[in-house]
Structures are given as structure tokens and as C-alpha cells.
Image: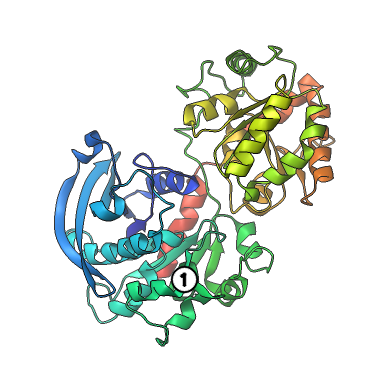
Amino acid sequence: MKVLFVTAEAHPFVKVGGLGEVAYSLPKALKSSEIDIRVILPKYKFPKKIRKKMMLLGRYKTYIGWKSVDCELWTLNNNGIQYYFIGNSFYFYRNDIYGYGDDDERFIYFCKAVLEGIKYMYDFTPDILHCNDWHSSMVSPLKKLYYVDNEIYANIKTLFTIHNIAYQGTFGKDTLWMLGLDEHDIQVKKLELNDGISFMKWAILESDKISTVSESYSYEIQEEGYGCGLNSIVKKRKKDLIGILNGIDYDIYNPEKDSNILYKYSKQNLDSKIKNKLYIQRDLKLEQDGSIPMITIISRLVDQKGLGLIEAAMKNIMSLQVQLIILGTGSSYFENKFKYLETKYKNKLRVITEFNDCKARQLYAGSDMFLMPSKFEPCGLGQLIALRYGTIPIVRQTGGLKDTVKDYNEYINSGNGFTFKEYSVNDMLESINRALNMYKNKDLWIQIMQLAMDCNNNWEKSSQKYKILYKNIIK
């Protein structure tokens, strides 16, 4: 099988969030004698050392509405995976990846350039185009709209993965001309949402199969409260919808070998985990005491991640015998609010408003608990990394959190974390307090840590499910 994985970001070239990580680790897990999987993404403002390794495969053109636009297709091999890059300096040679006023045009261009670029891959014509999130969502419908009679594309199937239905590429109807459509075109009904258009809606309707990044989330997005206006559309396609849980790369996230942490450790040797905690306390100028429970939040600072609950509960949390560390960037409201609270609780709270992967690994390794009280969570990678490092998750039962974190039961010694159901301050605090009470019993806490580290959240099982899905799509 030949699969072209279409994405807006992919580690190690560019990673803004979880999509960049999945776009690296899933193809790595799937690459085999049975599957020739390759990845395509925009050619952003990469460092010179990366650009020098790229080989130009072809120059060609596509259209944005009536405008003819230049395209370049570049390639390089990284760790056995072939990567393709769509080059256009005007659209992609910028300081940031997202957040521009012409993002609609940039990613319509990307989707069109991907489809045209297939002609220049020479030894590779994909059986499946595996598209991810709204940035590549136009590939499926545009293939049907403009390439239906082209023999190169006739047998290419499409899979669209929803990583987060809240971000669906919604724009005004003035974007339609870029797609070669006007308001009277019959296709527009498939795009319309409220007073504008939704790229993701069209992809859900036109792709051969749809997947999400956890089983629970695949059911949740069919409900009004979680579907962000697309729940009825998703429900129409439920026979073609499957939830496959994300994994993490165990080569990257490994407390026995992680070069980012000072003291390596394993399930059999947990003493060094406390040394990592003491290092964090020294580094962040907190009281140095290994017995003080340390809770970490590593997250985008946005409402989805439950930051409103944290804000409302801060006085209660700070009244407990804990140290709380928040790492992440996001909305200016939450960044400023938590920075202010840090000055108020300077002996117990630290807020680091930057994206720092090294610091994040050190926090995963040194903390006792990982707090993730999301309003909704398609999958979540933070809790999977926390489990790998023996840092016990405290999460709300939603989406992928519900699928991966099971409430600890001391009577039968089962579970790997602490969970709560309702999105409320009281329920969250009750779970935090349960965890803190368990923490007082050091022998019991070691058992919980070992149960967490016993969990297998690598890509092995999920990649097999994708392999089966690919085979079914082709059939």
C-alpha cells in the first residue's frame, strides 16, 4: 500500500502541537514492507541546514480562483521516511505557521499544490491520501471536484482524520472564489456553516473514510455539545467513522534514556525520580523538599484545557500542601492571569509561559502528578507522556482522557490515575485531594506509579488498526 500523509506540521521539521508529533510518530510506526507511507507538508522557513538537504523534484502551477500560482515540490529522507515539501515563499516563508489573515488562501493553495504535486513524485502514486485536520481538509473534496476524470487520481482513496473538531477552518463566503466556486454553485451547500463556510465540513462529507484520535471522541462529536456545529454531519457518516487512539513514540519518551532529564530512572529504580524533583525545586526557587507533592500542568493555555477550572480553584489548591507548576503558552488572558497569581502565591506556584520541550520533559520526570481537567479532549498526549514517566494523571473523563486514564481503586490495586466526571471545581478538587491522600502512603504511591509505567501507549496497537483501516479503504 502506498499512503501519502498530508499534514500542516511534522516533527522534526515543525511542531506546533500534537499534530506535529503524530505526523512523525505514526508514519514511523506504519512504515513497513506492506506500507510505503510518505509525508507531505509546506516548506516553511526552515533552517538552512534542513533546506540544503532537500532535492527539488519539480516546478509547476496551480490556481487560486482565477490566479495562476507557482509551486515547487521538494523532498528529503529522514530516518527512513520520505518527506515532500510544497514550496512557495509568499505563502510559507514566514515567521509563524498559523495565525495570518490569509490562512484560508495559504491552505487552499497547499491542498491544490499537493494534488498537482502527485504528478511529480515519479516513483510514487498513492493509493490513499491520509489528510489531517482543516489545513489539509480541501484535498478530498477538490480531488472529487477537479480530478474525477483524471486516470492518475481515479483509484486514489481518501481518509480524513479529525484531530480537533473545534478548529475546522471556518471562513467567510468571500473565500469561495479561491476554490473556484461562487454562492450559486451546488457544492456550496456542503461547505456552508452558519453564515460562513467550514473546510472540515466539506472534508467529512466527501472523504471515503473519517477517523478521530480516540474512540470516545468519535462518539462525543456526534453530540450537540461536542460537535461544534458539525455533530449532525458527523452522525450522517458514522458508518464510515472510526476512533483510533493516538500513541507516543517510546524511543523519544523514555525516562531511562531521555537526554533532557538529569537523573534517569525506571519502574524498578524510582529513587532518581525524586532527584529530578529536587532539581526542579532548586531551578525554580521553590522549597527543596522531596516529600512535598508537586503537581504540573503542561498545556496550551486555552479554555478547552480546563484552565477556567484551575483559575477558579487556585485559592483552594494553594491552601493545600503542594507545589504547582504551569508550563505553556496560549491566550493572553490566561498567561497574564496565571503570571499575576504567581506573584500572589510565590512560595508555591510557578508559571512558565514558553514552549520549552526540554523543560517539559524535566517536569514530567520530576513531578508527582499531572493535572489535565479538559472541557473536551480529542486524545491528549500529555497524560500518555505523564504515565510513561510515572507521573500520575488527574484528569476529567472526556475523549481520549477517558480512554487512557482509569481511576485508581486501592481495594483491588487497579487503575493508573485519578478521574472526575463533571466539569466542576468541586469534582476536580475532590480528585486532587484523593490523589494527595494516596500520596501520603509512600508504598502505595510507588505501586500506583508502577501501574502507570506498566501502561503501553506506544503506537503498536493503533498502527495495526490504521493498517486494517487502510486495507478496508482500498477494498
> Between 98 and 100, which is closer to the camera in this rendering?
100
Q: Position of residue 104 (x, y in %)?
A: 39, 63
- Dividing the picture into quarters, in which one does residue 244 lie? bottom right
> Between 166 and 103, which is closer to the camera in this rendering?
103
- Count the numbered circles shown: 1
Amino acid type, mark 1:
Gly
Quadrant of the drawing holding the N terminus: bottom left
Read off the residue under disc 1.
172
Decide: is 434 above or below 171.
above
Decide: is 222 above or below 45.
below
Q: Position of residue 229 (x, y in %)?
A: 61, 70
Category of crowding for the residue at label 1, using alpha-carbon neighbours closer than 10 angstroms: few (below 14), some (14–19), many (at least 20): some
Q: Position of residue 201 (x, y in %)?
A: 50, 71
- State the SS at label 1: loop
Please tell me which residue is depicted at 70% across the width and 21% down the height of the picture: 346
> Between 448 and 433, which is closer to the camera in this rendering?
433
Lateral position of residue 89 relative to residue 402, left or right:
left
Please tell me which residue is depicted at 67% across the width and 48% down the height of the picture: 374
Please tell me which residue is depicted at 35% across the width and 65% down the height of the picture: 108
Decide: is 45 above or below 219.
above
Q: Is residue 456 visible?
A: no
